[in-house]
Image (tube, rainbow, N blue to C red):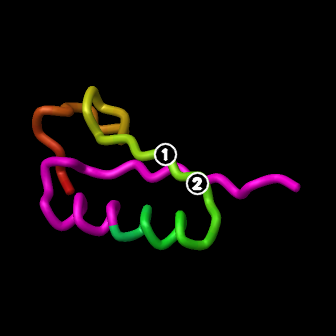
Amino acid sequence: MSVPEAGIIYNDIKPTACRVAEELEQQLIQRGWTVKLATGAGGILGYSHPDRPTC
């Protein structure tokens, strides 16, 4: 039996995004998921200027 997996990419500059990512991670773990978190560091979110995110 395989375990469902999820990846959560979030903007760690924004406190609300950090809180929501942590809450979602815990909810998924409680349901038996394997969860990986990644921040937007280095432009992973696709920003053309990572030092000036637009969202």
Per the model, the C-alpha gap separating discs 1 and 2 is 6 Å
Taking the spot 49% from the left edge, 45% from the top edge, the residue there is 36
Total marks shown come to: 2
Q: Is residue 29 above or below residue 12?
A: below
Q: Is residue 25 above or below residue 37?
A: below
Q: Is residue 14 left or right of residue 1?
A: left
What is the crowding at mark 2: few (fewer than 14 residues within 10 Å), some, or many (at least 20)?
A: some
Q: Which residue is mark 1?
A: 36
Q: Which residue is mark 2?
A: 6
Q: Is residue 45 left or right of residue 41?
A: right
Question: Of the residues shown, which amino acid type is indicated by label 2?
Answer: Ala
Dot 1: what SS?
A: strand
Q: Nearer the viewer, residue 53 or 29?
A: 29
**Image quarter in which the N terminus is found:** bottom right
Q: Earlier in the sequence, mark 1 or mark 2?
A: 2
Q: Are marks 1 and 2 in contact (CB under 8 Å)?
A: yes
Which residues are the magenta region?
1-22
Q: Is residue 40 above or below residue 43?
A: below
On the image, the x and y values in percent for residue 54 come to: 18, 51
Taking the spot 45% from the left edge, 53% from the top edge, the residue there is 8
Q: Which quadrant of the structure image shows residue 55?
A: bottom left
Dot 2: what SS?
A: strand
Question: Of the residues shown, which amino acid type is indicated by label 1?
Answer: Lys
